[in-house]
Amino acid sequence: MGFDRNTVIGFALLAVLFMGYFWYVSSNQQAATELKKRQEDSIAALKPKVDSAQWKADSVRMALLKDSVSAGSFVAAGSRDSLAVLENNVLKATFSSKGGWLRSVELKNYKGANGKPVVMGGGAGESFGYAINTLPGQSTESSKLFFGNVAVAKNADSSQTISYTSSSNGGSSITHKFTVRPNDYRIKAEIVLNGANQLVTGQTLNLHWNTVAHRQQADAEYEKTQTRLVYQTEGEYDYTTAMQGASEALEQPAEWFGLKQQFFNSSIIASQKLKSVKADVVVPAEGQDSNTVATLKMTAQASLAAGATATVPLEMYYGPNDYEVLKDYDNGMHNIVDLGSGVFAFVKWINRWLILPVFDFLGNIMGGYGGWTILLLTIFIRLLIVPLTYSSYLSGAKMKALRPEIDAMKARLNGDQQAISMEQMKLFREAGVNPLGGCIPALFQIPIFFALYSFFNSNIDLRGIPFLWAGDLSSYDSVLNMGFAIPFYGSHVSLFTITATITSLLISIYSMSTTPDAGNPMMKYMPYIFPFMMLFIFNKLPSALTWYYTVSNVITLILQFVIQNYVINHDKILAEIAANKAKPKNNRSGRSGWPACRRPKRKWMK
């Protein structure tokens, strides 16, 4: 296609027009931008200069003045805040004169993700308080008051007590008393109100408690999946998953209530049950606050006895989710340790009555908990299910013995799937072989797997324990950080997950070699799907679980070789199959493991 001179001139004029248009628009935008900037500069020049630091100081001063007015004749908290520390052999508790309450707890025997001792509570979001009347028609929060008259005492039972008191000019006073006992994660707390009939309306103390669960594990996102609201009402334990945020309004009074992380929990224990408990859990969005797992905001009511003086007894628990520790409290808090919940709640009995006692026993033998203890536990479990394993392999050996006949039958029927299925089932009946004999024993092992999944996810004894290349058996064992994330897999490579996947694949290959081909192309690939899925599912799971699965798979491969080659008598199996085939047809159903189907006679058939 050619262009004449007029066409070329036309295109050139259009180009000039476009260039001119863009220059004009750009010039106008630049001029508008410069004009707007001059206007903003002029307005800024007219505004008085404000010192941001001064503005902040003035805001704080106004807030303190407001608190001081609402406090009435009590003294509002200000710059006189001071800290005090009580400790025993397991924790160090820090108390504050602002609000006269527990501020934070350091756990001496546990390290956080940063390598420093685990600290629970503390920070700007931590507070505990309740509303009190200060003047007619006026009230304030106890958390805004300044508590003085601090007294520390050592008791005859080696416990320590600290008390804070805030008094008003009218004779009313509030005392907060705390007792730290030896070797105990519970901190006893008492709220004593002098002049309670004036300080509180309707003999009800309206409490609020905000507590922050700090990140304690290397994988904060996985830790969020293990975070829950936990509580007990009417002697029954319950929980609400908190990963996406949660809200609860309890209909029954609560005996205790708290926020559970993977291995720690913060809870309030009330000997006089708390009523009208309402709670909200706020979970930071991904990428917002990597050091906070969740924040619990709770309100509740405590009933007061009639009279001028009233006492509210409480206990604050900041400590580990240790089953034995919590079990000793005899108040149901051991249920916080997730040894089985939801649809798999039944496996907690396997963990409590079998896995946990055996694991503790083996740990005592080995002098600690770790990878070798898990290996011994795996051997124990596999020995326990040897009868099931043997039954499964025996069934597999019978199926393998029939394979030549099945292959010949397929060749004879020339790919007719319906005929092949019917003839194959007939052959199984005649030979006295149950094709499901290898699957049924495996089904009984599924509860054990789910029990161990819960056990390794919640056992704090494995936390921080290194083994081989794994730095922490309670978390995944990363041998490579890729720097980018693969969907459903993650950004790291877990070596124990790879070993578990490879050994599972080897088991699947062996199983396929002993199982007759059903003719369905999809069935050929089914045994390989689960090992492939494991690569994605297990990559973020605790290395204790993937190590267990690797050891269990290796034992399975060894047992397969030993049982198939040295235990099972293949000649005897062939003879038994031949004998079953030779029996009359009416006797074969009983030997096959397939129940005989006899249709009951109906009355009209008589």
Image (spheres, rainbow, N blue to C red):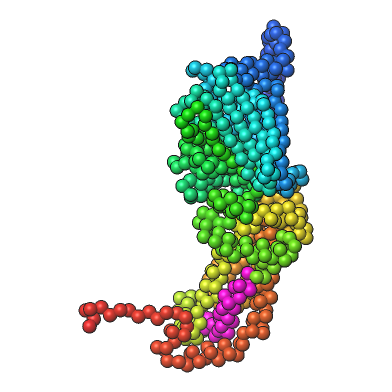
Which residue is at 50% across, 79% downward?
434
Left or right: 303, with 22 as reference point: left
Nearer to us in this view, 199 or 337: 199
Q: In which quarter of the image is the N terminus?
A: top right
User: As displayed, is residue 394 above or below residue 89?
Assistant: below
Q: Where is residue 462 in the image (x, y as percent from the top left)?
A: 70, 56
Farthest residue, direction front: 156
Q: Where is residue 6 in the image (x, y as percent from the top left)?
A: 67, 26
User: As displayed, is residue 99 above or below residue 250?
Assistant: above
- Main SS of the magenta part reads helix
Residue stretch in magenta: 381-410
Nearer to us in this view, 491 or 273: 273
Specify whether residue 396 is painted magenta.
yes
Left or right: 375, with 208 as reference point: right
Which residue is at 51% across, 54% downward?
342
Q: Position of residue 58 (x, y in %)?
A: 68, 15
Regarding residue 94, the answer to whether it shows in the image is: no
